[in-house]
Image (cartoon, rainbow, N blue to C red):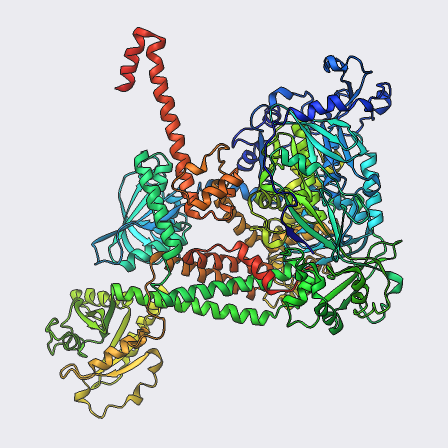
Amino acid sequence: MLLRLRPMTAATTTVVRPHLSPRLSFFFHSSPSILSSSPIANFRPHRRRIFPSRWSPRRSLTTAASSAGQDWKDHAETIEERYDVIVVGGGHAGCEAALASARLGARTLLLTLNIDRIAWQPCNPAVGGPAKSQLVHEVDALGGEIGKIADRCYLQKRILNLSKGPAVRALRAQTDKREYAMEMKKVVESTSNLFIREAMVTEILVGKNDNVEGVQTFFGMNFYAPSIVLTTGTFMSGKIWVGRTSMPAGRAGESASQGLTESLQHLGFETDRLKTGTPARVDYRSVDFSGLEPQHGDEEVSWFSFDPEYHIEREQMCCYLTRTTKDTHQLIRDNLHETPTYGGWVEAKGPRYCPSIEDKIVRFQDKDSHQIFLEPEGRNVPELYVQGFSTGLPERLQLALLRTLPGLENCLMLRPAYAVEYDYLPAHQCSRSLMTKKFEGLFFSGQINGTTGYEEAAAQGLISGINAARHSYGKSVIILERESCFIGTLIDDLVTKDLREPYRMLTSRSEYRILLRADNADSRLTPLGREIGLIDDRRWNLYQSKQAHILEEKERLKAVRVSGGDFAAEVSRLSGQPVKDSSSLESLLKKPHIQYKVLDKHGYGNKLLSRIEKECVEIDIKYEGFIARQRSQLQQILNQQHRRLPEDLDYHSMRTLSLEAREKLSKVRPQTIGQASRVGGVNPADITALLIYLEASCRKSTEKKRQELLRSIPTEADGTGSSLATAAQA
Amino acid sequence: MALALLRLLVPCRRHKNPLLSHLLNPKIPLFLPSSPLSKTLIPHLKTLTSRAGAPEQTLVLTKDERFGSSEAARDEATPEAGTIAAIVTSLGGGAAAVGIVRLSGPTAVSVAARVFRPVGRSKEASCAFSWRPRSHFVEYGFALDQKGNVIDEVLAIPMLAPRSYTREDVVELQCHGNDVCLRRVLGACLEAGARLAEPGEFTLRAFLNGRLDLSQAENIGRLISAKSVAAADSALAGIQGGFSYLVKSLRKQCIELISEIEARLDFDDELPPLDSNMLINLIDDMWHDVRQALDTANYDKLLQSGLQIAIIGRPNVGKSSLLNAWSKSDRAIVTEIAGTTRDVVEANVTVQGIPVTLLDTAGIRETDDIVEKIGVQRSEAAALAADVIIMTISAVDGWTEDDTKLVEHIWKNQKSTGSAIPMILAINKIDCAPYFSVQTFEAVGNSFTKHVQTCAVTGKGIPELERAVLDVRGLDPIPAGGRRWTVNQRQFEQLLRTQEALSRLKSSINEELPMDFWTIDLREAALALGEISGEDISEEILSTIFGKFCIGK
């Protein structure tokens, strides 16, 4: 259950001259944190990975005494901790960001409230699903981690939408939540250039040029870096609710992070509040599965990662399906006044894709039963996740409610369902690099941008991690265009659209999804990952040989022809279409219901190809026409869509724009024409007006330059100048 | 390689980004060799000071390596914003002598080449023909449709960039000034890859390409925004209740279908499976609705441009008398001599308010007379171009062998042009054979939509003939509910686009493509319908999904 709330504190936008206060407060109050500078040498990690000896890292710790002026004279030397990138938060966004940044050679500090909760899965321990799996594949193709960990820790894997088309085929894995967190933590801990520290960040330190310089923690420590990534999740002023009772917390049992929201508000950021929730967990051993419909994993396991090293099969666990009953519905109807939404103590508009069970029952009164999935949370954990059953009812009613479900009549509840509300920053304050428009070097990722989901978080984390590292080295930031991948679509939506609910990735959000499939995520993005520096030689060679195999096989299928025989007979039987003599294998593969397997069966397949490669070949050939059509449609709109808009446009002065468009465009400040057209309330006429305005002002400025040039000639060279000017006029 | 390295290391400003340029020109190597020195883009030096000002950005449009080759092939055809086409002379008024279809854009010449065939080139040669026109040099020839049939006789005037109104390549096709010709030529251009120009788009391009000055531009801005605002909120409102209702309900159906499908793509395990037969039936219904709308749109055109009726038949069956009786004139010369009419004779009448042009033709027969031969050819041409054919026979002679031949001949001609013009059988001279039995026509009855018995001398049967004409064209004199509306070219075009999308959808279904592919053409149809009603679809689909289904974890 997720809800949107009014901000707890009014969204004040007082801008304090930022470079004054934080700095000074550090100098005056942080004397207790003085450390000796001797352990520096031990602190230094080995740099083995991508940037060997040639990289001369900046000194890991710098003494600040020399730069500190008179006040410092009396104190002993203090250590100033300097990094290239600081990532605040160790969730799914934070881990990807920190890993990407460190792997690119940036000295990266990961600050987290609790090291034992790195990469925790506080809600459904599952990765993937429609559209989300595309994100995971894409993150993996760029060299991210989430897919590998999910492949390593899965309890069950299933392909969804198998028969509905290659672009919407989606892999979903139930994961072992403990194992997942452990594995990710291991990776984070063993990555060179990556340092972990427990801390609660309360303030962002900014410099004179609207750039970030570092963060300050609750205990008064300052950490410095030119790039800061905030991935605060549900922790910023987090508050959890069970029924009418609430307490400050980021998750059940974990303290919230206080003070950072105010710091961001002081810096002029607009904040708002969202709410999300998680259902109850029941004890596996108290459930009677005998009458429930089991849901097994796929026999042939598929993978998120393109790296075959992670393709290690393991024993799968089973999920179960149960349903709400009359009693469930009755109990909820009788107690609606006890739920936050219907009791009226929370002003609520729940997100549409994640309704609470009470919402479902109230809104869809004609349905007398709803599906509920029981999903294991781990191999050594007795917890079952009750999917589809989140509720705002008080704890005293929750067990009774659970026991109305078949199979759960005698169940024991381990954790009650609860909701959490937290601060987020509407993402129109970020550009598509995920860097904030206000402060250079400050990046936001994950739930702080209003998203939900581990996959959405990981995707943003990867991009901000890459860009934070690049920024700290003075490199251009990377922006993925909307049309190139789901990650780009996600970020484009976040920064242009006015979100009214937590954002979840859906297949229908992508206009050209037939081009953005799981199977081609690597051929779309791995070359970029290589260029950025996240794909090592081994992965790159694997990638290249895979592409070569696919290409060769497609050539072969074009060339090999068959006439008659068992094979042709079977093809014509399966497809219901006649087979001409001397048909190419390619043309046979294009026929309905003919899969590569049929070729294999009759000995026309290529034994050297892997299952994944065969699938790629099949898709490329089978849907060639559609793919080509979409590509050419896309190509037609791209040039205009990608036309850049100057950053300093004064939309309010453009009389030809509608009032609404002026307002929305001033707020969102899109970077391209395409983005502008996706801002809500901007219609095609506004876009035309914008194009005309751009062209007009461009021409005005050239004209002005020309005039100035003409005027400057006579003053520079008196005698000859006038004759030149005359010549120019003539 | 050094160059490539440099390109990647230099921070890219503005549009110049290496990946995009690589996309456009794959010959430039994109990737660095895997030597340890160049494993990263991030330079070793840290240049804090260089970061003043706006952050630099590298915009990445990744390409799919698996489709690398096709990309290169398409490059030259990649238009800046497409090639546009429109009828630039006024429509709907009285027929002018000449009307102009203008094409503008980077592929204007190649689009025109697909439509235009200069005189002196055979059909066969035109397949491999690439038209390389000389700028500002008028060429005479024919406009052809996709199948290669001649639509009109035209003059093509190529004006190559930058010496044109829009400063793009422009080709103007001067056609005959009647609406039907113009629309068919425009239709052919659209089929050949152009898209219909937005209101004022030629002028907009002229401006964007630096052709107009600022004061002119401001006027255009006002003009265009006024027009599109009008298009968005008033194109349908009020004035055309029936049409608006149809478009909106079709669009709603499209969106509901998309939602049905997409809800199941995103929330696979939470919804009951879809009944694909029901979907297919719905899609069929929609297709028929669109077709009907198009027919109605055609009716609207008929109101403006009128009907052409060709009266054909063997010599001396009374075609000319029929024309004279119908038009209450002595427009055609009538004698007892077979083959009196040598040329096509026109007369104008009004049937239920619809202007009708009657064409009396030379009797069709084998002949050695050179003048009559030309007349016969013209008769056949008139029959092909008409909206309705009235085949006349004489009740005295009954149905003859020659009549059968004639009908078969007309059929053959029609088949080759792919049209199906409704035919009415007029049994003339009924006064001379009062006991004439209709039964004798059973054998050929199927080829005619209607039989009417007439007597040209007394004028008997003319009202029945008029009714038959209206009937076969579906021009019911009593308007059925909501069928009277006016559809402009833009709306017509979008209806066509809808119909094409639905036709493709039907073929996807027949080829048993997975359901995700259905959404592509459904979206296209919804977008086209949305263009008429001025609505966008993206958020609406999501709202429908969430409003309609109980989903979510």
Give percent across and percent down for residue A3: 66, 53
Is there any visible trace of residue B330 in the rendered image?
yes
In this rendering, is residue B247 above or below B195? Answer: below
The quarter of the displayed image where residue A457 is located = top right
- Name the image quarter holding the N terminus of chain A: bottom right
- Name the image quarter holding the C terminus of chain A: top left
Give percent across and percent down for residue B106: 40, 41
In this rendering, is residue A611 above or below B3? Answer: below
Q: How many marks?
A: 0
The quarter of the displayed image where residue A461 is located = top right
Q: Is B266 on the left-hand or right-hand side of A109? A: left
Front residue of B105/B545: it is B545
Front residue of A491/A205: it is A205
Give percent across and percent down for residue A721: 31, 10
> Which residue is found at the position 22% from the left and 85% from the top?
B395
Front residue of B394/B526: it is B526
In this rendering, is residue B443 above or below A667? Answer: below
Front residue of B243/A654: it is A654
Is there any visible trace of residue A548 in the rendered image?
no
Q: Is B237 on the left-hand or right-hand side of B53? A: left
> Which residue is found at the position 84% from the left and 48% from the top?
A178
Residue furthest to the bottom: B435
Give percent across and percent down for residue A676: 50, 42
Residue furthest to the top: A719
